């Protein structure tokens, strides 16, 4: 079957192969009642374990109950396979404040700074709890988020949510590199499941990094990045490749010929100019420019209709997992926000940072138990 194990050492949906579809949701907790929140997290966990196995959210099911009651599953995934569904939970800094969990709050969960050029809309940013639902079938991902929202009624409310299509990364060497809406391969130089030593160094929180409950987990950064595709599409191929620092067809660094050639930032052309421009995206994002920092990128394309000005409301819903955002996302994004020539075509409109604990190993464990 195409089910991905829900229980395990790690949460699924991080280093498991990136699926094609996303429904990402951020919730705000609307009760002060700690027991109600814990009860909901237990119910969520049971529903998540069932739905990722391709079952109804509840044990009675969409059509198995008495006609006088609302069903414990909404029904739109009836007959559909598990579709590789993963549900990954994360906790935002605001949750710790609301429930007096200050002592458990990791220092790594410090608010992201405002970066140059940011146009962040708070209404579609942050949140107390996030769930990243990924699947091969959008109906399955939406079904999962909808049922969690239904179960959480009265305890949480949906703050914002985002649909994505077309993964913009590969998280395994067995996956072909997909393309983003600029038409370039995205995910070539990503952290991959087959590099466990690199994952230990850059992805998973280690003992001693912070509070114990996060050991084996990872920090999730989301950035909704509007891409002004109409302007990009009037830019020459040569200019596009210069901005990225890679060729559009093969995805090779401009210093090489094959996709997986290591970029050589010292290579120069006949006129003595660097083959990979100093202000290109791959150079500025590369570990050598950022004190060795790396990310596991797992983002998705989005098109939220059009903007009323004759343009697509399109872009990249950027998702990155890491061991410590203060040493990874923040310095890399600072570098990009200051110097990247791609910025002319980009606008960051939403931002999120969540602490994703390790996986649940036993069927009687539940999301957030180590926090409450
Ligand atoms: C690499 C596109 C935003 C970090 C790349 C590549 C492309 C790309 C085409 C080369 C292929 C690859 O190695 O994956 C974009 C687009 C963005 C965007 C279109 C915005 C809409 C970001 C952001 C960050 C980031 C916000 C992090 C702060 C990276 C990193 C690499 C990379 C770390 C790999 C660099 C290397 O090691 O060679 N990106 N990117 N990107 N990007 Fe982005």
Image: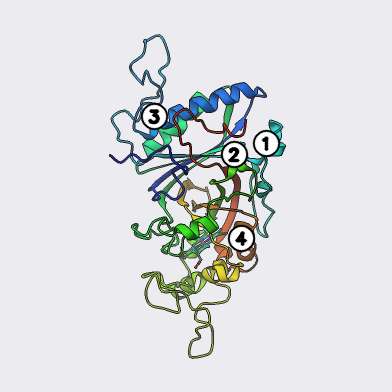
Asked if disc 1 is less than 8 Å from ligand 1, the answer is: no
Q: Secondary structure at mark 1?
A: helix
Asked if disc 2 is less than 8 Å from ligand 1, the answer is: no
Q: Does the residue at mark 2 contact the one at mark 1 (Cβ under 8 Å)? A: yes
Q: Earlier in the sequence, mark 2 or mark 1?
A: 2
| Res 333 label | 4
Q: Earlier in the sequence, mark 1 or mark 3?
A: 3
Q: Secondary structure at mark 2?
A: strand
Q: Report the front residue among 309 and 215.
A: 215
Q: Earlier in the sequence, mark 2 or mark 3?
A: 3
Give me the C-alpha separation between circle 4 and circle 2. Answer: 22 Å
Q: Report the front residue among 128 and 371.
A: 371
| Res 254 label | none
What residue sits right under mark 1 in the picture? Answer: 96
Whether residue 158 is situated above or below residue 334 in the rendered picture: above
On screen, residue 108 versus residue 268, left or right, reads right
Nearer to us: label 3 or label 4: 3
Asked if disc 4 is less than 8 Å from ligand 1, the answer is: yes
| Res 50 label | 3
The 10 Å Cα crowd at callout 1, few under 14, some 14 to 19, many 20 or more, is some
Whether residue 16 is situated above or below residue 59 in the rendered picture: below
Q: Earlier in the sequence, mark 4 or mark 2?
A: 2
Percent coordinates x, y for residue 349 in the rendering: 60, 50
Q: Secondary structure at mark 3?
A: helix
Percent coordinates x, y for residue 272 in the rendering: 53, 89
């Amino acid at each position: 079957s195409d089910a991905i194990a829900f229980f395990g050492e790690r949460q699924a949906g991080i280093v498991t192969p990136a699926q094609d579809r996303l429904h990402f949701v951020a919730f705000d907790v609307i009760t002060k009642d700690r027991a109600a929140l814990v009860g909901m997290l237990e119910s969520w966990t049971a529903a998540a374990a069932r739905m990722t196995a391709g079952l109804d959210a509840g044990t009675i099911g969409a059509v198995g109950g008495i006609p006088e009651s609302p069903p414990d599953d909404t029904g739109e995934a009836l007959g559909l396979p598990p579709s590789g569904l993963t549900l990954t939970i994360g906790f935002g800094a605001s949750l710790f404040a609301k429930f007096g969990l200050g002592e458990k709050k990791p220092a790594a969960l410090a608010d992201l700074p405002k970066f140059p050029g940011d146009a962040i809309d708070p209404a579609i940013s942050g949140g107390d709890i996030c769930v990243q639902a990924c699947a091969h079938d959008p109906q399955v991902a939406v079904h999962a988020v909808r049922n969690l929202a239904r179960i959480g009624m009265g305890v949480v409310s949906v703050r914002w949510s985002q649909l994505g299509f077309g993964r913009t990364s590969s998280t395994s060497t067995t996956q072909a590199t997909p393309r983003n809406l600029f038409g370039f391969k995205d995910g070539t130089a990503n952290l991959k499941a087959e590099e466990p030593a690199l994952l230990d160094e850059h992805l998973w929180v280690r003992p001693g990094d912070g509070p114990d409950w996060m050991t084996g987990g990872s920090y999730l950064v989301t950035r909704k990045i509007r891409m002004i595709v109409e302007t990009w599409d009037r830019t020459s191929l040569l200019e596009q490749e210069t901005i990225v620092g890679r060729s559009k067809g093969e995805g090779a660094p401009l210093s090489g010929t094959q996709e997986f050639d290591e970029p050589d930032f010292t290579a120069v052309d006949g006129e003595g100019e660097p083959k990979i421009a100093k202000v290109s995206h791959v150079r500025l994002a590369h570990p050598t420019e950022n004190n060795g920092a790396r990310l596991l990128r797992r983002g998705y394309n989005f098109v939220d209709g059009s903007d009323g000005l004759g343009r697509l409301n399109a872009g990249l819903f950027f998702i990155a997992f890491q061991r410590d955002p203060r040493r990874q996302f923040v310095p890399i994004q600072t570098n990009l926000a200051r110097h990247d020539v791609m910025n002319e075509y980009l606008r960051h409109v939403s931002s999120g940072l969540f602490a994703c604990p390790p996986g649940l190993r036993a069927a009687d464990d539940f999301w957030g138990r180590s926090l409450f």
